[in-house]
Image (tube, coloured by chain):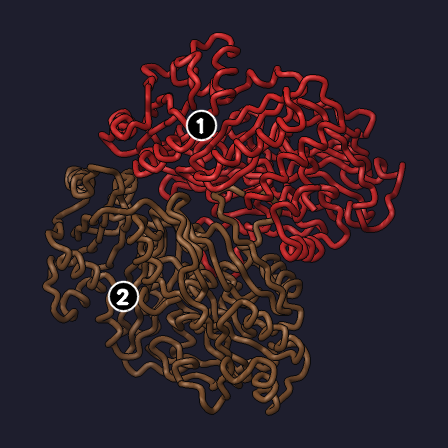
Chain colours: A red, B brown
Amino acid sequence: MQNRNTAATGSDRGGAPLPGDGLEAVLVAELGDALVTRSADIDPRYFTAYNEPAGARPHALVRPRSIDDVSRTLALCTRFGQPVVPQGGLTGLARGAVALGGEVVLSMERFAGIEALDAAAGTMTVRAGTPLQTVQEAAEAAGFTFGVDLGARGSCQIGGMLATNAGGTRAIRYGMMREQVLGLEAVLADGTVVSSMNRMLKNNAGYDLKQLFIGSEGTLGVVTRAVLRLHPLLAAPATALCRVRDYDAVVALWNRVRMLPEVVSFEAMWPAFYDYVARHTPGVSAPFVGDDGFAVLIECATSAPGGDAHQALETGLAAGFDAGLVEDAVLATSERQARDLWTLREGLAIDALPHLVNFDVSLPTGELGAFAERCEAALRARWPDVMCLFFGHVGDGNVHIGVSLAGMTDADLDALDHCVYAVVREMGGSVSAEHGIGVLKRAYLAHTRSDAEIGLMRRLKAALDPLGILNPGKVL
Amino acid sequence: MQNRNTAATGSDRGGAPLPGDGLEAVLVAELGDALVTRSADIDPRYFTAYNEPAGARPHALVRPRSIDDVSRTLALCTRFGQPVVPQGGLTGLARGAVALGGEVVLSMERFAGIEALDAAAGTMTVRAGTPLQTVQEAAEAAGFTFGVDLGARGSCQIGGMLATNAGGTRAIRYGMMREQVLGLEAVLADGTVVSSMNRMLKNNAGYDLKQLFIGSEGTLGVVTRAVLRLHPLLAAPATALCRVRDYDAVVALWNRVRMLPEVVSFEAMWPAFYDYVARHTPGVSAPFVGDDGFAVLIECATSAPGGDAHQALETGLAAGFDAGLVEDAVLATSERQARDLWTLREGLAIDALPHLVNFDVSLPTGELGAFAERCEAALRARWPDVMCLFFGHVGDGNVHIGVSLAGMTDADLDALDHCVYAVVREMGGSVSAEHGIGVLKRAYLAHTRSDAEIGLMRRLKAALDPLGILNPGKVL
């Protein structure tokens, strides 16, 4: 992926002066050698975002083993006005977990593992550093499904997923990370541990504090643990890829398919995206090659004893055929075939395109077709040879855009952002559906949020982190 | 219902001195006669909580017709440090919407109506004063279901339901009010209008501000409008009442029934509750009278074309019979019969019991049986003749308790609260599942929330409402 300008924003930090070169020594003295890695010894993976060149080397790396370690680290950083970047699996796409210059990185990777799984209640208590895949596998072993799935499941961590309110491919069925959380524990900038480890589905006793920390990208507190809700185990899914003429037909098909309680995913690939991945995904024999239509991936699954996801999917497809919406369809007859269809949709093949830039935006499902047309027209007006590949979770109004332009300059890169986000603003959409704001979209927050909203965000930030030490230069 | 001690807490207000008798004149001069009702002219319904004697007469009643009216009213009250009680349909059960003495009441009843219904997106834009039933009927007319239903549907208002994060009988399927909201608009204490009228299912652009106002009972801002999400229309439901031996069997049955994607409600009545309502509900011929078991009401419904909720319900019941969990069952064969089963569960008959006190608490579903036993034992140890009636939405861990005691004194009343909430605390439950804290549970907030949590709530309150004019004496 193309690198972007990073403004190293020392002035954003606010707060007391840094202790300077003495910082490492202070951290080691207070926290111990076992927790602290000195700047020169930090492995580049702690300052390198996914698919990007290495970023700024942090002042120090702290890897806590306990909640108390997190609390002591933050209390110490508050004492010195020292900026801190909380860090999960570094799979985010908005550069929210990397240092910009001058920060201590607080990696949660050692505070990992499942503390409890309550099968009677259908809940799991996990530590922030636990990878998603570990949670998914433990849930399945106990007869449950975890509600969020995404491509980075092997490396992304629950804490980072909570901090960014991760979405993924099942949001139409189960919602995003926010909807999977019953209880949450976070540590404030001053080291205060706020433990709201609620285990109940319903709890209206006072403010729902966990909401503050979900989706605020580590700027209001550091997530340490969570009580996650689990869903009844889904049996093997049924997966199909459909050929659909145009986006209006995609929406009409969605409005039929969403009536099925079994639907888990409804993902669309615009013609240019599908044509590219169908031709360039090694080892996958794609259906409908050479057609000029949309490809829609539908997955159904059910937890009902004796339930039949294939039957449900066929019902949905039949309704689509009868209404003239589906022109052709392929049902996966093996797990391998289903995997291949998903591989096309995940579209890793497009990562090889020169100077690829990815966008993640949302609008109501019915407006995404017009958005894609306007967006591509605006880009092509300035860069006639631009490649615009639209795809995504259209059932929940979320589209990703891969934009590739031979010989792209830094000026082009900024202009691309301006161009895409201007269309999002005009149409009243969001500049971030599921990836967060981080650094990359910070300049465009006001495209989606009003002055009054941003003012209230700043009020919250000032109330919870008055020195501004938590993830400065991110989101706000 | 038994009245409770109300501490008129003028000292909780904080902020500047009141303008005293001049207040009415100032309000009328600034807002106009059409919006302001003087204290002496206020109809008692504006200061009387559901099922309670009239409370404190407010200083004045303001009934805004626009967002600007709300903003001007709050800005004015901030100028004079004048406490304000936001008010919806006054159907709450924690006394969160009534004045304690010295407040202006801000009733949202005139700012009502549906502004938009987007059938393509499945969303509805509504004003705070809109009754739930209006929303439900508009949703159904457009081919959708609204996710929350509760007994007070004809009088409760969307704004109040949002402020209290109302729950109801469908939370196991659709969640509480929080889960129905895509966008929200609220007015802060100083009159700032924070409009976050997001229409997208996924929007991770900055902090999710709406969460602050949902469930905070009007203490952080006044909800004016919301964008609600709608669900596919459910066809006519299938309803059954089952006779189940004991609570362990109720839980085992729930763990089977929850696998059905069609389940909408799973409600249990403990033996004493069921025995009472079966004998005392006029016009309803109850099944299983004289048995000494639990009664479980299960409702299934589906939006799937050709889907069969009766088939699903029968599958669930058959699994329950086969496992020896269900001893007898009655399937409603008409809408009237289904309504009768719900009438039993709603239990209005117990309102006639002398000195009835209602509780609303939650624990994980599997622990509610032990809770009921411990709670009843604790009450009976002190009051041997007490009547304890347990019932509720056990699929989501929420139980209500009707406690009746002949000749109950005010001292008994306080001791009852102590007794019940002590058991909740010991078992790690919540003192409010869905009714909120209001005034009635304020003294028990710390039974469920830690000092650090309450400290953070106070920090938020101070950040958003520094003078403390919004609903003082409630929640915190």
Residue picked out by circle 1: A268
Q: What residue do we see at 49% from left, 88% from top?
A: B39
Closer to viewer: mark 2 or mark 1:
1
Type of amino acid under label 1: Ala
**Element carrying mark 1:** strand
At which x and y percent is residue A208?
Answer: 52, 55
Q: Nearer the viewer, residue A104 or A52?
A: A52
Q: Nearer the viewer, residue B267 or A62?
A: B267
Q: Nearer the viewer, residue B88 or A320?
A: A320
Q: How many marks?
A: 2
Q: Along the horizontal axis of the image, is A201 left or right of B303? A: right
Q: Nearer the viewer, residue B379 or B288?
A: B288
Local crowd size for mark 2, using a 10 Å CA cut-off: few (<14), some (14–19), many (≥20): many
Q: Residue A15, can we see it?
A: yes
Q: Chain of mark 2?
A: B
Residue picked out by circle 2: B389
Question: In the image as oriented, which residue stretches furthest toward the right?
Answer: A21
Residue A394's quadrant in the figure? Answer: top left
Q: Chain of mark 1?
A: A
